Amino acid sequence: MPVVVDADAHVVETERTWEYMDEEAVRFRPKLVAPQDEPRNLRWMVEDKLRRRAMLGPQRGPQGRNTEAPEEAREMVDVERRLSHMDQLGIDVQVLHNTIFIETVADRPEVEIAVCKSWNRWLADLWKQGKGRLRWSCVVPIQTMDVALSEIRTAKENGAVAVCLRPIEGNRTLVDPYFYPIYEEASRLDLAIAVHIANGNAAYCDVFRSPYDPGAAFGMFRAPTAIACHSYIMSEVPHRFPILRWGFIEASAQWVPWVIHEARRRYEAAGKAFPDDVLKEYRAYVTCQTDDDLPYILNYAGEDSLVIGTDYGHFDPSSEVDAISVLKKRSDIDPSALGKILSDNPRALYQV
């Protein structure tokens, strides 16, 4: 039977996450607080600033999607419970991404280093307990490149399959040469770059906060992921790093035809040949959702570039813990394409 890979699952950080800090960094340890107006919406206090934590949510999410997951599995209190739930969902391997780093976590480099190191050590510990079924994307202290590269090397030795980056990191986009050392190291170690929905520019996030859309996830997080893919296609990065794989995670795939169409027009205007299957040629993969118009998207993306994730552990528009079984029931997708989305493509992206 093909190995089914959940390309986008999550761990929800708890106070145990920060027990892996070096002794001299304990003073930077994040603390859980509950805002008076939202007592169920716990936040992390880091550097005297409130940072995000996954909300407690309903068992049925947006559009009636199933988001039910045992708390001890969401928070990895009981790894065996997580593995058992994966069995129930028909998932062989989950690739775990963070929750807290969806926005900037720390302004000072020394705090960012402490938080990233502890998170990575926690995931390394979970990987050791996961019987090869829990792989992960590491987080890196972007402000301190030498430490970032060291963390990538250590993560690779402890089960990581990708380096997680936000579409915008501070005042830089991901095609900035500042990130080239990360891409070189990821290429050398055969790790992917996971561009997970997020935003590391606090001013940008503030612009999109709105009383009409309290989460503001589309403008703050999802749209920048699509823009990052377009920037990647238009840049020198695919050619400069010819074996590096890229995943654009948790923004659905509905935007793929638009991005490819726009990029093709710009290639043609510049007198350059546009690849027939640009995502495949540039080693780019995109997570789809079960309600995406997949026959239409596949006309642009091809069969070799889509993967699917459950967003396990969250309660937002991308969350659907039984996405695998729901996708399998669709009759409008060729079985060959379906098999690639569930198994071949995520295994190629993450090398699992």
Image (spheres, rainbow, N blue to C red):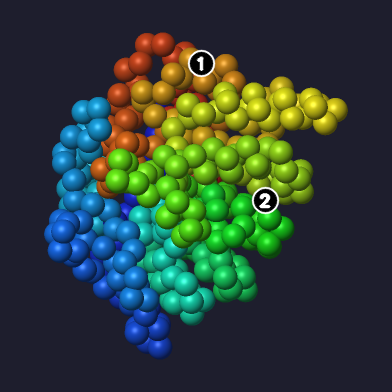
x and y percentages locating residue 145 in the rendered image: 62, 70
x and y percentages locating residue 319 in the rendered image: 30, 38
x and y percentages locating residue 229 in the rendered image: 60, 39
Q: Name the residue under label 2.
A: 175
x and y percentages locating residue 115 in the rendered image: 41, 71
How far apart, in angstroms, are the residues tagged by discs 2 and 1? 28 Å
Q: How crowded is mark 2: few (under 14 residues within 10 Å), some or many (20 or more)?
A: many
Q: Determine whether, in the image, residue 103 is placed left or right of residue 186.
A: left
In-front residue for pair 74/269: 269
Picture quadrant of residue 3: top left
Residue 173 position (above or below residue 345): below
Q: Which residue lies furthest to the bottom in this view?
A: 24
Element under disc 2: loop
In-front residue for pair 208/165: 208
Quarter that holds the N terminus: top left
Picture quadrant of residue 48: bottom left
Q: Name the residue under label 1.
A: 296
Q: Residue at x 62, y 52 (%)?
A: 174
Q: Residue at x 62, y 73 (%)?
A: 146
Q: Which residue is drawn at 76% across and 27% down?
A: 274
Tag 2: amino acid: Val
